[in-house]
Every structure is written in structure tokens, then in C-alpha cells.
Image: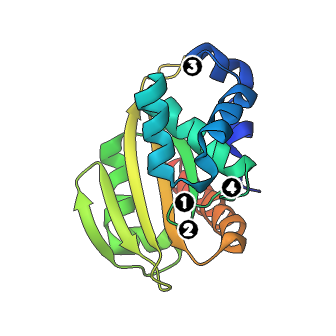
Amino acid sequence: MSTRSSEAVVSDARLREATGRSRAEWYALLDEAGARQWDHTRIARWLGGEHDVDGWWAQSVTVGYEQSRGMREPGQRSDGTWEANATKTLYTTRERLWPHLADEDLRRDWLDVDWPMVGVTEPRSLRLVADDGSRITMLVDDLPPGADGRTKVRLAVQHARLADGGAVTETKKFWRDSLADLAEIINT
């Protein structure tokens, strides 16, 4: 599983619909303004301030621009660190899922590591620190019931401060496999 570029995540048609311009048009404007020498924050603020681009879309255009100009690789944060993200929809309730995240023994059953918890907002989110110092945030969101009426939640994982771009693919696979193991435990 590779890390997708900004262009693979948001279609050019959707970008034009939301901002009034295509990628090529935004990138040409940014080049003309000298944005290759700017940091991430300055680019996003310029889009919002000079062109009234909504914050989320300004971030999307900025990331895409940085990737297209070799200023950033897919999976790389603006500060130069790397991160991997994964999500899983689970057919359960937040209350039933939460112990499998917060309790060390239950977490070890599906995660198979002993990373210490360094923060928690029960029953919504928790933070862990991996052995290599990378940081993991898990966030639980309730979802509307499915067409079959079953209760479901989304578990989103952000694994930040990875060592390099090579760690992103490996980390995504780790989380994909671990979340599948969690789903199996939850659904038995």
C-alpha cells in the first residue's frame, strides 16, 4: 500500500468546483507569486488571504503544490517528518470498542505491542508512544447506522514522526493488519 499524492486524493474537477480554479491554474498563480521559496504556512495563508480559499481547500492546494514542485513527498508533513494514517469502520458501539483501545492487555491482543499510553480523552481518543519515539493518535467517531440498522464507529489512526518515507508504507501495512485483527476480535 503506497502513500497517495494529494492529486490522487482530490480530483481536479472537485478542486475546481470548490475553489473556482484547476490545479494547473492554482500552481501557475503560486509560481508567479514566488511560492517555491515560501513555507507551507505562507502558501496556505496567501491562498486564503489573497484568493479567499477556504482553509481546508487552501491546505489541499498547498500540499498538492508542494508535492508537484518537489518541496514535499506524499506522506511527508510540512515540518519534514513523515506520517501514516489508517481508518477502519467497525460494527460496534464506542462503549464496546473503548476497552480494546484503553486497556493495555486488551490492546495487546490486537496490536501485539506494549506502547505506553501518554494521553487519553475517554471514550474519544488516546495517544501512544512507540518504541522508536513515533507518536500514535487514535480517534473514535460515531457513524450513522448502516442500511441494515447496525451501529458502527470509525477508528482513525495517525502515526506521526516516522523516521523516513520508507517507514510510511510499512507502517500503513502494520495498521491495516492490526485494525483487521481488532475487527475480528470485536465481531466475535
Q: Are marks 2 and 1 in contact (CB under 8 Å)?
A: yes
Q: Amino acid at mark 2?
A: Gly
Q: CA distance from mark 1 to mark 3?
A: 23 Å
Q: Are marks 3 and 2 in contact (CB under 8 Å)?
A: no
Q: Are marks 3 and 4 in contact (CB under 8 Å)?
A: no
> Residue, x 44% and y 66% (percent of image)?
136
Q: Report x, y in % for residue 61.
A: 60, 36
Q: Are marks 1 and 3 in contact (CB under 8 Å)?
A: no
Q: Amino acid at mark 1?
A: Arg
Q: Which residue is mark 3?
A: 19
Q: Amino acid at mark 3?
A: Thr
Q: Which residue is mark 4?
A: 74
> Residue, x 33% and y 53% (percent of image)?
98
- Disc 4 secondary structure class: loop
Q: CA distance from mark 3 to mark 4?
A: 22 Å
> Which residue in the rendered view is the most extreme toward the bottom?
131
> Residue, x 71% and y 33% (percent of image)?
28
Q: Earlier in the sequence, mark 3 or mark 2?
A: 3
Q: CA distance from mark 4 to mark 2?
A: 11 Å
- Disc 2 secondary structure class: loop
Q: Earlier in the sequence, mark 4 or mark 2?
A: 4
Q: CA distance from mark 4 to mark 1?
A: 8 Å
> Residue, x 64% and y 75% (percent of image)?
164
Quadrant of the drawing holding the N terminus: bottom right
Q: Which residue is mark 2?
A: 80
Crowdedness of circle 3 by 10 Å Cα count: few (<14), some, many (20+)? some
Q: Which residue is mark 1?
A: 77
